[in-house]
Protein backbone atom coordinates (compact mmCIF):
# COMPACT_ATOMS: atom_id res chain seq x y z
CA UNK A 1 0.00 0.00 0.00
CA UNK A 2 1.45 3.36 -0.97
CA UNK A 3 0.81 6.69 0.64
CA UNK A 4 0.66 9.92 -1.24
CA UNK A 5 2.95 12.67 -0.01
CA UNK A 6 1.74 16.19 -0.52
CA UNK A 7 4.47 18.60 -1.46
CA UNK A 8 4.87 21.41 1.03
CA UNK A 9 6.77 24.62 0.54
CA UNK A 10 10.17 24.63 2.26
CA UNK A 11 9.81 25.50 5.93
CA UNK A 12 6.06 24.86 6.08
CA UNK A 13 4.95 22.35 8.67
CA UNK A 14 1.92 20.09 8.06
CA UNK A 15 0.29 21.61 11.15
CA UNK A 16 0.56 25.09 9.61
CA UNK A 17 -1.11 23.83 6.46
CA UNK A 18 -3.96 22.39 8.52
CA UNK A 19 -4.31 25.65 10.47
CA UNK A 20 -4.38 27.67 7.25
CA UNK A 21 -7.16 25.52 5.80
CA UNK A 22 -9.17 25.72 9.03
CA UNK A 23 -8.87 29.51 9.13
CA UNK A 24 -9.81 29.70 5.46
CA UNK A 25 -12.96 27.65 6.13
CA UNK A 26 -13.92 29.81 9.11
CA UNK A 27 -13.43 33.05 7.19
CA UNK A 28 -15.46 31.63 4.31
CA UNK A 29 -18.35 31.25 6.77
CA UNK A 30 -18.02 34.97 7.47
CA UNK A 31 -17.51 36.20 3.90
CA UNK A 32 -20.23 34.17 2.13
CA UNK A 33 -23.09 36.01 3.92
CA UNK A 34 -21.29 39.32 3.38
CA UNK A 35 -20.91 38.63 -0.35
CA UNK A 36 -24.54 37.47 -0.59
CA UNK A 37 -25.81 40.52 1.28
CA UNK A 38 -23.70 42.87 -0.80
CA UNK A 39 -25.61 41.72 -3.90
CA UNK A 40 -28.40 44.02 -2.71
CA UNK A 41 -26.12 47.03 -3.20
CA UNK A 42 -25.15 48.65 -6.51
CA UNK A 43 -21.93 47.16 -7.94
CA UNK A 44 -19.94 50.33 -7.29
CA UNK A 45 -20.80 50.13 -3.57
CA UNK A 46 -19.99 46.44 -3.09
CA UNK A 47 -16.93 45.93 -0.89
CA UNK A 48 -15.95 42.55 -2.31
CA UNK A 49 -16.64 43.28 -5.98
CA UNK A 50 -13.89 45.89 -6.11
CA UNK A 51 -11.27 43.14 -6.46
CA UNK A 52 -12.30 42.19 -9.98
CA UNK A 53 -13.53 43.87 -13.15
CA UNK A 54 -15.57 40.87 -14.19
CA UNK A 55 -18.61 39.64 -12.32
CA UNK A 56 -17.99 36.70 -10.02
CA UNK A 57 -20.31 34.47 -8.11
CA UNK A 58 -20.97 34.87 -4.41
CA UNK A 59 -18.70 31.94 -3.51
CA UNK A 60 -15.88 33.22 -5.73
CA UNK A 61 -16.03 36.69 -4.16
CA UNK A 62 -16.00 35.20 -0.66
CA UNK A 63 -13.12 32.85 -1.50
CA UNK A 64 -11.11 35.72 -2.95
CA UNK A 65 -11.68 37.91 0.13
CA UNK A 66 -10.81 35.05 2.50
CA UNK A 67 -7.67 34.33 0.52
CA UNK A 68 -6.58 37.93 1.02
CA UNK A 69 -7.35 38.11 4.75
CA UNK A 70 -6.12 34.73 6.06
CA UNK A 71 -2.39 35.04 5.14
CA UNK A 72 -2.13 38.13 7.36
CA UNK A 73 -2.80 35.88 10.38
CA UNK A 74 0.50 34.10 9.75
CA UNK A 75 2.60 37.26 9.38
CA UNK A 76 4.57 38.61 12.25
Image: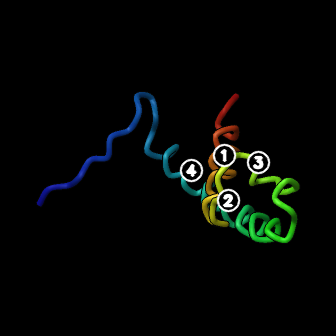
> What percent of the width, then of the height, locates residue 2?
14, 56
Question: What secondary structure is found at the residue carrying circle 1?
Answer: helix
Within 10 angstroms of label 1, few (less than 14), some, or many (20 or more) residues?
some
* First reached walking from the N terminus: tag 2 or tag 1: 2
* First reached walking from the N terminus: tag 3 or tag 4: 4
Marks 3/4: CA distance? 28 Å
Marks 3/1: CA distance? 18 Å
Taking depth in this image into account, of 6 and 67 the one nearest to the observer is 67
* First reached walking from the N terminus: tag 1 or tag 4: 4
Query: Which of the two discs, 2 and 1, sits closer to the camera?
Result: 2
Marks 2/4: CA distance? 19 Å
Residue denoted by label 2: 62
Question: What secondary structure is found at the residue carrying circle 4?
Answer: helix
Marks 1/4: CA distance? 10 Å
> What percent of the width, then of the height, locates residue 47?
82, 53
Residue denoted by label 1: 70
Residue visible at 81% across and 58% down in the picture = 43
Residue denoted by label 4: 19
Q: Quadrant of residue 72?
A: top right
Tell me, yes or no, whether the two marked residues, 2 and 3, touch with CB atoms within 8 Å. Answer: no
68 left or right, relative to 3: right
40 left or right, relative to 25: right
Residue denoted by label 3: 50
Within 10 angstroms of label 2, few (less than 14), some, or many (20 or more) residues?
many
* The C terminus sits in image quarter: top right
Relative vertical location of residue 33 with respect to residue 43 in this rendering, above or below? below
> What percent of the width, then of the height, locates residue 42?
86, 62
Residue visible at 20% across and 55% down in the picture = 3
Amino acid sequence: MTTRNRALAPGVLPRETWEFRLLLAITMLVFVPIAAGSRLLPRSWRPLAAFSDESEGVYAEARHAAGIVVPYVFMG
